[in-house]
Image (tube, helix red, strand yellow):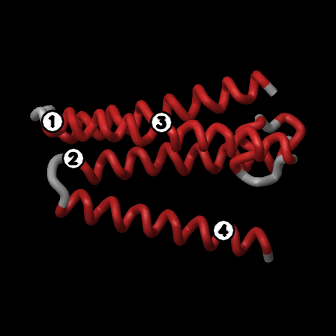
Amino acid sequence: MRKLAVGGILLAVVALIVTVGLLLREHAPGNMGVGFLQGAAVGLLALLLMVWRLSKRPDRATTFERAWSQTGDERDDAILTRALAVLGLAAFPLTSVAAVAVALGVEPSMVFALLLFAEIVVGGVAFVVINRRN
């Protein structure tokens, strides 16, 4: 019954992603829909890989996989919480710099893409550093 529920939820999420992606392709400027669909596909593949690793070999799952799926212990949860706190602290100045760049006339789509990549890097580096220190 649990596998059926998880499969149903996964299918509903995929249907929602495809619907939003197709709406963006039709009505959004540029190639926003294609980028959304590609990013969603990468994210879903990463999620499925994480679920597969946790179900087949939970002893070999990484700290991030255990923390993100909430199957880890207190240490895993504390590391993720601290890394997300660092990301939250860095998000305001990063967003401020992005707003200034847009105000100065830089292409907004490029600024927002760089903002997203910068936040991903900050979160990843924070997680790795905090994990190594503990």
Q: What kind of residue is marked 3? A: Ala
Mark 1 and mark 3: span between their CA atoms? Answer: 22 Å
Q: Are marks 4 and 1 in contact (CB under 8 Å)?
A: no
Mark 4 and mark 1: span between their CA atoms? Answer: 40 Å
Name the front one of labels 3 and 4: 3
Which residue corresponds to mark 3? 90
Q: Residue at x 51, y 30 (%)?
A: 122
Between discs 4 and 2, the one toward the N terminus: 4
Which residue corresponds to mark 2? 31
- For residue 46, above or below residue 16: above
Q: Which mark is residue 7?
A: 4
In the image: residue 25, left or right of residue 61: left
Furthest residue to the left? 105
Mark 4 and mark 2: span between their CA atoms? Answer: 30 Å
* Figure label count: 4
Residue 3: x and y, percent? 76, 68
Q: Secondary structure at mark 2?
A: loop
Q: Residue at x 41, y 33 (%)?
A: 117
